[in-house]
Image (cartoon, grey):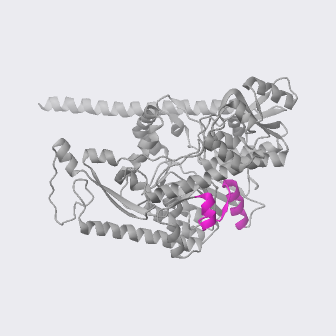
Amino acid sequence: MNAFFKTFFASLLAVVAGGILFAVLGVMVLVGIGVSALSGNTAAVSSPAAHTVLKIDLATPVVDNPSQGALSSLDWVTMRMNRELGLLDVLGALERAESDKHIDGIYLNLSPVMPLGMATMEELRDALVKFKERSGKFVVAYSDFYTQGTYYLSSVADRLYLNPQGTLLWKGLSSNVMFYKGLLDKLGVRPEVIRHGAYKAAVEPFIMDRMSPENRRQTEELIGTIWSHVVGGIARARSLDSAALQQYASTLAIGDAALAVEKKMVDSLAYSADMEAMLAGMTGQQETRFISLEDYVMQGQVGSSGGKGSGNRIAVLYAEGDIVDGEAPEREVGGETLAAKLADLRRDEEVKAVVLRVNSPGGSALASEVIWHEMELLRAEKPVVVSMGNVAASGGYYIACPADVILASPTTITGSIGVFGLLFNAGQGLKDKLGVTVDVAKTNPSADIGLPFREVSPAERDYLQHNVERVYAGFVKHVAEGRNLTEAQVDSIGGGRVWSGVSALDNGLIDAWGGLSDAISLAADRAGVSDDFSISVPSQAPDLFTRIFTLLSARAGVDHLQNGLGELYREYAGLQKILSRQGVQAVMPYRLEIR
């Protein structure tokens, strides 16, 4: 018997060791493949020849903070590299193209599936306007199918073209919410909700089967202000009447390509081959010479008004994703992780000012408090400017409010000053549906509070409500101090209510409209180094060992699930996040996109 166990454990050890070795070797091969692929792409890029057209299709996602390293960019299902472009790099490339004698103009041929958030889209649109005004070069747009997002971005072009059999989608904005109350009722699961603010709608899908009047009111106002901004921008760019554009959307008047020309929403109809011939003529060439945005970005460096070698550094730090307790990987904001980065920048004498780019719907209230405190310490020693991205709401606003200046896009989703707690009681459902019962032994009446097998007692509900109210009061106090408002004023625009950047400027939640480049320039100016500074982007990637094993354990499964669920994955991911959170939460109630 002893010999058997010796053989068994020796075999088991060999299997485990072999598995670990195989995994490590596999990762090394994948990293090698990824690095080779990235290196190969870089080597293939050459400087543009004279009379080249910069072609922008945005098929490659433009994100605030691109994944760092080949491992993070690897799609574990297709085994291909998912490329991403950094927003700062793209803005810098467009600025560089203004004075690049080899670039004659820009050709927009945007992908209908454009992976851009609304604020990112706004910043790119503003950059295209600056390109036209400062360079005098042409911007021409073409599409087989304009979505509302691609049309809004393309509307700044000198001329717009559409495929004769193509479509221009023009119908207005909507926001839908999926409700789970009926499902929970069927399963016998009862949610226990503790919140402050009638507008804090993140919990509504679990307790209602439709929007509350408050949520409908805030949602309609939110998308209404954003839609008015979009319509106004198009009207100004195309010299059209805003009321007419609203009427076209209400009556679905743009039914085909010919009507789009008739209503002056596009200038002419053409095919893709016609566009290439036209662009060749505009550049005086036999054939059009193109360089893609991705290749052009890879040639240059991040554009700035300061010198690249300056010792006066303006640090750009990213808070992107859900806010969680402790440390966190890429695409999440760990309270301890971000606070430590802020502390490092505070101690670094070469860093003269900090720009925090916030693109977060919020999350843990405790983690938000940890970051807020470090923001306060940082602001006491050097200028801090917050640049809001697509969304900086709830916890995302919590960490932004201490800044000296807050800039946002008119289409940024922000506010949502409110908190909630969410528990579930599945005890009755388990008994009725599955015949499963749960019993517990405990030393004190509430020792098992939070377990999903019983209802919350009145005393426990009071205890939880007290914590929610305490966190909300602290949130309001921080905002009032950071924004020079009274607590009553903050409470009047709080209660969980979500605002667009348009409304946030009116109610004092932000200081001005502006993008990431504007925030950097402002930070340099406040630090007194506007004529001599460099941009520094501190690495926020975890160490290689952590990245390898995090990706091995989770990423492949996520990729499989995402590919299988398609559009439904976002709904699943949002639901999974809500259900997995513990403690008091400061989270925005929904996601909004222009399509």
Decide if residue 281 is in sight here: yes
- Specify the farthest residue to the right: 284
Left or right? Give the position of 579 relative to 5: right
Magenta stretch bounds: 500-527
Task: Say whether residue 511 is magenta.
Answer: yes
Left or right? Give the position of 36 relative to 438: right
Q: In which quadrant is the N terminus drawn?
A: top left
Question: Viewer-proximal residue, 320 or 480?
Answer: 480
Which of the 4 quarters of the picture holds residue 161? top right
Q: Position of residue 418 (x, y in %)?
A: 45, 64
Q: How many marks?
A: 0
Task: Say whether residue 293 is magenta.
Answer: no
Which residue corresponds to the image point at 55% horizontal and 74% vertical from the top-left? 481
Up the image or down, 359 lies above or below 2; here it is below
Which residue corresponds to the image point at 78% horizontal and 61% vertical from the top-left? 531
Up the image or down, 412 lies above or below 172; here it is below
Question: Viewer-proximal residue, 516 or 129?
Answer: 129
Q: Position of residue 520 (x, y in %)?
A: 69, 58
What secondary structure characterizes most of the magenta part? Answer: helix
Q: In which quadrant is the C terminus drawn?
A: top right
Which residue corresponds to the image point at 51% horizontal and 64% vertical from the top-left? 398
Left or right? Give the position of 337 relative to 6: right
Which of the 4 quarters of the picture holds residue 155? top right
Q: Position of residue 286 (x, y in %)?
A: 85, 23
